[in-house]
Amino acid sequence: MKQLTQKLLKTQPNIGFGISRLTLGLIMLPHGAQKFLGLFGGYGYSATMDSLTDQMGLPSIVAFSIVMIEFFGSISLILGFLSRFWALSIAGMFVGIIYTTQWQHGFFMNWFGNQAGEGYEYSLLIIGLALATLVNGSGNWSLDHLISNKTVA
């Protein structure tokens, strides 16, 4: 168990990896706050769960996971805590988003409102940031870095 924890928390002490992680967390936080708290014009937890399960037909556990990953995952990424876990969760979630709702609309986002839905270019950017964090860890200025340094010493 200790080895797994060390692998999960180990990070490369590089500011670039910290920037990728922080960018991912900051981009995802408003989306999570919409779904969980109803901020930024969002509907909040209950209405979001209803929308994801009733309108989109997602299983309750998937809908719950989406809300938790977007809200708590983004906060954890900003703090640099268990970043590899949250990055993997976000990458998996966005692969699912591409598969279920975006693939059919092509690559480009619906910038001009002339498509039936959104393309997957934004999702690919998120997946790229998540994979960079997954591979390299949290980088400098992260709780993972602080914790891993204390467990090694």
Image: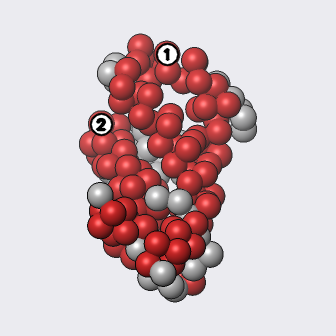
Say whether residue 137 is visible. no
> What amino acid is found at the position of numbered circle 1 in the picture?
Asp
Question: Of residues 102 and 32, which is closer to you in this image?
Answer: 32
Q: In the picture, residue 2 is in which quadrant?
A: bottom left
* Residue found at x 36% / y 30%: 62
* Residue designated by label 2: 100
Residue found 44% across the figure and 23% down from its top: 52
Which marked residue is nearer to the observer: mark 1 or mark 2?
Answer: 1
Q: Quadrant of residue 19?
A: bottom right
Does 133 sit above or below residue 75?
below
Could you say where residue 25 lies in the image, as x and y percent from the top left? Answer: 57, 58
As drawn, the residue found furthest toward the front would be 153
Report the residue that reaches farthest toward the right. 40
SS label for mark 1: helix
Residue 90 image position (x, y, % from top left):
41, 51
Query: Number of numbered discs present?
Result: 2
What residue did someone put label 1 on?
Answer: 50
Q: Secondary structure at mark 2?
A: helix
Residue 44 or 4: which is nearer the viewer? 4
As drawn, 49 above or below 150: above
Q: Quadrant of residue 47?
A: top right
List x then y, in percent, for residue 151: 46, 72
Label 2 packing within 10 angstroms: few (<14), some (14-19), many (20+): few
Compared to 26, does 59 lie above or below? above
Q: Which sits in the foreground, 97 or 135? A: 135
Tell me which residue sits at (64%, 25%) in the image.
Answer: 44
Q: Is residue 136 left or right of residue 80?
A: left
Task: Check disc 2 and give the amino acid type.
Answer: Thr
- Left or right side of 59 for 137: right
